[in-house]
Amino acid sequence: MKEPRVLLVDDERFFLDLQQEFLADSPVRIITAQSGREALDMVRRDRPGIVYLDLRMPELDGTACCSTIKNDPDIRDTPVVMVVSEGKPRDRELCLDAGCNGIISKPLDRIQFLSVGRRLFPAIERRQPRHPFSALAFFRVRETGFHGTVADISLGGAYIACRCDLSADEDIRLGFLLGDAGVVECRARVAWMNQGGARPRKSLPDGFGVQFQSMEPPHQEVVRQIVARLG
C-alpha cells in the first residue's frame, strides 16, 4: 500500500519545521515545497493526500496554485488547506474563491492544524504524547490571577496542577516559567478538569488539561525544543 503523503508548502523554513512537528505522530510521509510552482509540480508527480498551502508564496502565489489544482481534472480532488495571516478577511475570501477545502491562520495552532487536516485526510493523527515536566505556571481567569505547576507538556498542551474554579472549554491566559528560556505565554483552552475525589485521572494531582492556542512562533519554538529534549 502506498504510504500516505502530506505536502507542506511555505517559503519560510520555520513554518515548515513547525508543521512537521505537528505531524510527528501521524503515519504519513511528509514532503515540502518552498514555492507555488514547486508545489504544483509535486502535487502532479507525488499525488499527496492533502496539501497545506501558504497564501503568500514566490513564483506562483497560493490562491493561483490552489485554483490551478482545482481546475485540473487529474488532481482537483486533492484536499487543499490554505494558510493565511490572522485578521485578514479578504485573504479568506480569495482562498474560498480559489476552491480550497479549508483555511487555517497564522500564528499556527496545533489543534486547528490537525483538526482541519484530519477532517479532510484521516491519516492525520490529532493526539500527541505528553511528557512529565515541572515548571511554575500562572494564569488569569475572569480577571483573577492564579498560580500552579506544569505537570506535563506536549507541543499542543499541558497539564496544570492547581485547584481553582474552572470549567471545560473556558479560555484562560496562561504563562509558565522555563528557566533560562524565560516566560512562555499564550491563550489556552481548558480541555478537561481533574479535581476532587471523583477526578478521572487520580494518578495526577488536582488540576486541569489545556490546549495551547495563539502561541507566538518564538514561544512555539521554545516549547518544541523542550518537548524534543524530553522525548
Image (spheres, rainbow, N blue to C red):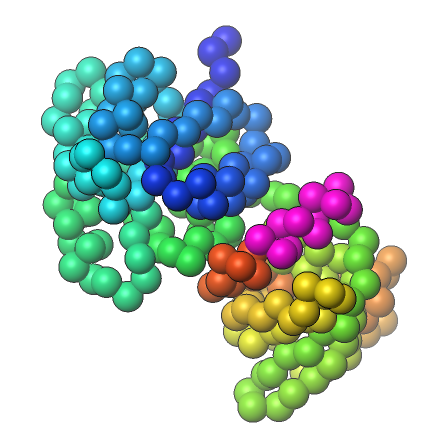
**Residue 47 position in % (x across, y down):** 34, 18
Residue 227 belongs to magenta span: yes
135, above or below 60, in the image: below
Query: Which residue is farthest front?
Result: 180
Q: Main secondary structure of the magenta part?
A: helix
Q: Is residue 83 left or right of residue 13?
A: left
| Residue 114 left/right relative to 42 | right
Q: Quadrant of the C terminus?
A: top right
Residue 220 placed where, x, y %?
56, 56
x then y, percent, for residue 71: 12, 27
Left or right position of 94 against 176: left
Query: Eyeballing the image, is 214 above or below 228?
Result: below
Which of the 4 quarters of the picture holds residue 62?
top left
Q: Which residues are magenta?
A: 221-231
Question: Residue 85 at x, y = what percent?
Answer: 31, 57
The residue sitting at 44% across, 41% down in the picture is 13
Image quarter for residue 82?
top left
- 52 sits left or right of 71 in the view: right
User: Residue at point 64% right, 55% down?
Assistant: 223
Tally the marks. Answer: 0
